[in-house]
Amino acid sequence: MESLKELRLSKTAIKELPSSIGNLVGLEVLCISGCKKIKGLPSGIHKLLHLKHLLLRNCFELGKFLDNTEDKWQAPETSDRINVSTSCMASGEHLVSVLRETKSFPFGTSLDGKSLPEFPFLQSLDLRNCNLTEVNFLMNMSCISTLEELEFSWNNFVKLPAWISELANLRKLELNFCRQLQEVPILPPSIESVSAIDCESLEVFSQISNMANSHTKDFPHVKSINLTNCQRLAENLGDTVANILLNQDRTFSLTLPGCEIPEWFKYQTKNGFFYFQVPELLYAELVGFALCAVVSESSTCELQGTINGELVIKGVENFISLKSDHLWLLYFPSPLVKAWEGCNYIEFSLEEIDAVDSSIEKFIRRCGLFPEFKHEEKLNWTLENNIISATHYPEVIYDEDSEESMGSADEHTEETDAGGEYEDDSEDQQRG
């Protein structure tokens, strides 16, 4: 049975899989999601050495089995025939014939905790809503080095084991609605996305604390962290959490409860629109942009950014079932857009794309923007009348750094007289 690559038994009434499933040695995808009566896995499953994707979502009874893999497990006796509903898959009849070709269905096979299936090529494991209280059954599996995606949402464990940091290729971790989860340990450097929506008991996320306070890049590949409605964690992280944006060098997004924009966001507005000009010398020093928005209602927000009229940033974020005001923290590196002589024109705008006849102010109370430059402290830049200027221009900084400067910084402080096509919104803008 090497030819069968994918087997889907979703939402069927099966109570267990036959050990003969191990004869499907070429199988790469096994899905038994929604099989609410299934109570265990047969020992033959360990023969599926080429399995890449194992989907066990909503197998509620399976958690009892996985939580006790150190004990001998015996499935209840049943008939030697499997009933597959016609809604299972289009080729349901073919599936039955494939399994019948194995000629025997030795149900009731035990699974010893010391002989767990290894799955040496497993890339994704979906255990959403399986009534799990712990996940230690993964510890001795060979897939610990190959897993890229883990779905643990809607389970009952209190904390994740420390060995999760050993999942060297893990990119995506889903922990949504794990309402008893209290702690997330150090995660592997490979992680790109973490979602822990409505983890109301979550209090510790060590890596985020380290990133905000120690200015280290503990998440070198991370793109998104969603902590919607994680109120306890947000309170523990405190006001310094926004500092995490200053440690980024690639696109990054963080959502968590909060209502205050830090003062270092020098440009703040209520209308979701930013416009400013950057002189050519300073534009060459532009590293990226940090954005902080206070989201007050569930919404779908679209962010667009242009430089010199060229669309360089566009993204959409869904904010669902917010129980309080939330901070949306974003960082994106400065796109490579050729500088104009004189001044360069930069715009950012936020819009709610699903609402009819509603302004962005209904969904976002306030937002702030911080342009990040090289030699931030030495530039001493300010924003006034929509124009960014600096007391020390780049060539002076470089000369000072190399101790070869013979001139004075005052020779370079002349303000640019370039005008803008927009009026300054003095009521909504905070000047640095």
Image (tube, rainbow, N blue to C red):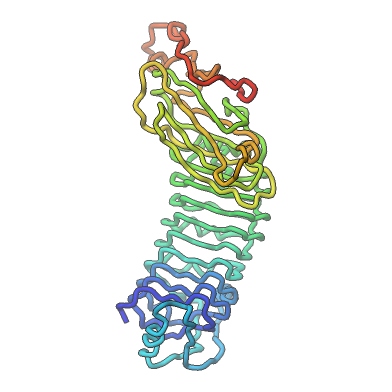
Image spot of residue 294 (x, y percent)? 63, 38
Residue 432 can be seen, yes or no: no
Image spot of residue 421 (x, y percent)? 48, 19
Residue 190 can be seen, yes or no: yes
- Asked whether 409 or 127 is in front, the reply is 127
Judge whether 121 appears above or below 3 on screen.
above
Judge whether 223 appears above or below 388 on screen.
below
Judge whether 268 appears above or below 101 on screen.
above
Residue at 48 percent of width and 37 percent of height = 304
Q: In which quarter of the image is the C terminus?
A: top right
Say how many tags the image has: 0
Q: In this view, does 148 lie to the left or right of 369?
A: left
Image spot of residue 148 (x, y percent)? 43, 59
Q: In this view, does 318 lie to the left or right of 309?
A: right
Residue at 34 percent of width and 26 percent of height = 338
Q: In which quarter of the image is the N terminus?
A: bottom left
Image spot of residue 282 (x, y percent)? 42, 20
Q: In which quarter of the image is residue 309?
A: top left
Residue at 64 percent of width and 43 percent of height = 326
Q: In this view, does 308 lie to the left or right of 187?
A: left
Q: Quadrant of residue 101?
A: bottom left
Judge whether 126 appears above or below 385 on screen.
below
Residue at 61 percent of width and 68 percent of height = 133
Q: Residue furthest front?
A: 357
Q: In this view, does 357 lie to the left or right of 107?
A: right
- Asked whether 403 or 5 is in front, the reply is 5
